[in-house]
Amino acid sequence: MTNDLLPWYAVRVKSNFEHTVSTHLRARGYEEFLPTYQARRRWSDRIKEIQVPLFGGYVFCRLEASNRLPVLTTPGVVHLVGVGRTPYPVAEDEIKAVRRIVESDLMAKPWPFLRVGQRVQLVRGPLAGVEGILTKFKGNYRLVVAVQLLQRSVAVEIEGDWARPCGQPYFPVAAVVANSTYSPRTAA
């Protein structure tokens, strides 16, 4: 089986070990992918532009699941993401899409994962502070707000970047730049 036919897996790594694991996997002959983005970090005496992992705590790797021990014994690797002890592959088109984003000249950054049907709070736009359920209709995002007593709802069209999952803090762009603890959660 050629490398291009092997599925991609998400490798969970120790905090701040993404670059180390990526280098070790490449040295062991694996095709790895560590998507990064340009971020500014402020230290007490300076501001510096650095490459930060787009998915903190994760590196992607093509491998045969039945022969995963060399990957699992790589310094800094915690486990392969999956269900129980069974690793679950990442969809090829998702990896291709992330790769195209990273290779483009467009500015990319981590973003909270939003699902249609999820309760969200608007943090931008004219309705900032309003909470409701995120829906999508004919390709447009909408916020649905219900009046329980009347058993009626109202929907308003919104921009996707206005919404954040309820209970998740909103950091303005300047604060995101200074915040290095963002880490997307693994979907089960």
Image: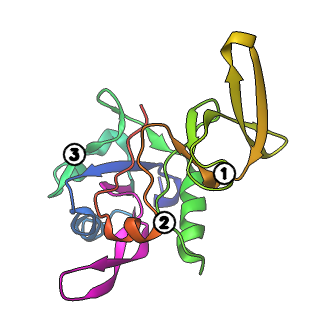
Please, what is the three-letter code of the amino acid marked with disc 1?
Answer: Gly
Which numbered disc, 3 or 2, marks the residue closer to the eye? 2
Q: In this view of the protein, which residue sits in the foreground, 152 or 88?
A: 152
Q: Residue at x 31, y 26 (%)?
A: 84
Q: Which residues are magenta?
A: 32-60
Q: In this view of the protein, which residue sits in the foreground, 170 or 105?
A: 170
Tell me which corner region of the image, top left, top right, bottom left or bottom right, holds residue 106.
Answer: bottom right
Residue 69's label in the rendered image is: 3
Q: Residue at x 63, y 29 (%)?
A: 117
> Is 110 above or below relative to 80?
below
Residue 109's label in the rendered image is: 2
Q: In this view of the protein, which residue sits in the foreground, 64 or 178?
A: 178
Q: Residue furthest bottom?
A: 46
Q: Quadrant of the C terminus?
A: top left
Query: Are dots 3 and 1 in contact, CB under 8 Å?
Result: no
Q: In this view of the protein, which residue sits in the foreground, 108 or 121?
A: 121
Q: Which residue is mark 1?
A: 160
